[in-house]
Image: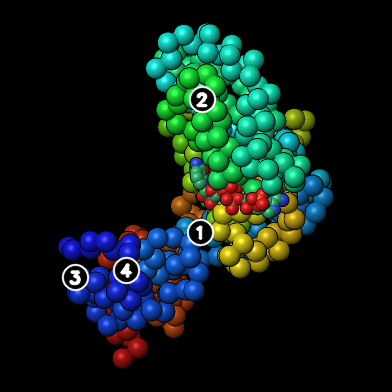
Amino acid sequence: MNLKQFYKKDYSTRLSLLSTQLNLTSDELTLIANQRSQQGDAIIENYLMDYSVPEGIAVNFLINGQEKIMPMVTEEPSVIAAASNGAKMMHMGKGILVQTTPRLMMGQVLLANVSNSSKLSAQLTQNEAQILRVANEAHPSIVKRGGGAKKIRVRQLDNQFVSLDVYIDTKEAMGANMINTMLEAVANYLHIELGQSSLMAILSNLADECVATATCRIPFERLTSRTLDGKQVAQQIVLASQAAQVDPYRAATHNKGIMNGVDAVVLASGNDWRSIESAAHAYAVKDGQYRGLSQWKIQENDLVGSLTLPLPVGFVGGSIKINSQAQLNHKLLQVGSAAQLEEAIVSVGLAQNLAALKALVTEGIQRGHMHLQAKSLLLGVGATQAELESAQKELEMAPQMDEQTAIRILKRIRTRRN
Ligand code: NDP
């Protein structure tokens, strides 16, 4: 394929290059045209079209005494239903209580091939005031907003690496770009003043000084299932929580369930979900073993849950300003700051986790998934909206729920109709 200097071409030239070389049909070109937006070209390089993911609303949240809804962007069936279900169980009493730490992001100037790491570490520590000054002078506007570089930490990683960690208050922004600007200035300063060159200067996504904790307390009677009483369900959930503490294989899936909710709200809020994913998983292994991020225990007649997550999200910055849907979602979330956004996100993570664990230790996860799974399968094999209702009923009752069965059911319905 010849796409030389693709990035230099204008939109229509790029499209016609693709069209000729990949034989795009007129239907495919119409699809691209319909999905093209004004903003795309301004946000990313080599823009082609918007790729849409459904957004829905999870309900029943009571967070720090305030009723909330959650706009969630996800392609996975059952995520929103599970979040609403988890939030409903947690709604009693005080609902979900959330605490956030003061928000400090961390960036590192990584120094390599260090000949005397103890000496260098001491020099860096002695130079803290100058390092903070250099960082702040590189981005004075954040200092004017009351933020900026606040402290440093020096870590000798091994014989050849020293990490200079700079902690920065980025106020309402996630801060990647401002942190990187400040760190590059610090790296330059170290080169000139200490003769120490750096390998790289960039923020760390392990934002363990920007953390939110959600807790909840659920009376046993709210947990009753078809076959178990509430206390039994609570005991099973506690066991599931313990399993995720001791087995990384289980912990990975436990945490994936949490991130089903977290990512969906992060995405809806216009934030960088990759940074939240990497922060969460790095945090899950902070003591050397990968563990479940949430924990559940029994206290008196209640199931008590807690979830702590690093949540370096922004209320401003990145593409939020030009993404009107992200701004609308901030309104739906009723948040006016990055800290309030953290509160919403960690709450949805805990709700999602509760719903998943309850389903897993009672009726199994598939039962809840079946309804939407049937719908997805049928739409995937070409069912129309008119055919959907009856086809879905038949597919849910079929001994197997798979693509072949969906095709057979659809054929049967169409024959009956004709
Ligand atoms: P921006 O570069 O957009 O910076 C934030 C902007 O918001 C600044 O221009 C700042 O203005 C403005 N602002 C307005 N009000 C406030 C306020 N109250 N507090 C703070 N800032 C305010 O975004 P970020 O620096 O937050 O960077 C986020 C982006 O970086 C994300 O899109 C992410 O994908 C990307 N990124 C992520 C990386 C990673 O995770 N490893 C690496 C590199 C990039 P002013 O300048 O006047 O202060």
Q: Does the rendering let one see residue 222?
A: no
How far across and how far down the image is residue 23, in percent? 19, 74
- The reply to whether dot 4 and dot 1 touch (C-beta < 8 Å) is no
Between the residue at mark 4 and the residue at mark 1, the CA separation in whole angstroms equals 33 Å
Mark earlier in primary sequence (4, 2): 4
Tell me the residue at 45%/26% (across/down): 198
Can you identify the residue that label 4 sits on?
9
Nearest to viewer (mark 3 / mark 4): 4
> Residue 78, image x and y in percent?
52, 58
Mark 3 or mark 1, whichever is nearer to me: 3
Q: Nearer the viewer, residue 319 or 7?
A: 7
Q: Nearer the viewer, mark 4 or mark 1?
A: 4
Q: Which residue is mark 3?
A: 21
Direction from residue 68 to residue 265 in the image, left or right: left
3 or 1: tag closer to the N-terminus: 3
Residue assigned mark 2: 192
Instruction: Calculate the distance from the C-alpha at mark 4 to the C-alpha at mark 2.
Output: 41 Å
**In the rendered image, the vertical position of residue 358 relative to residue 12, given as above or below:** above
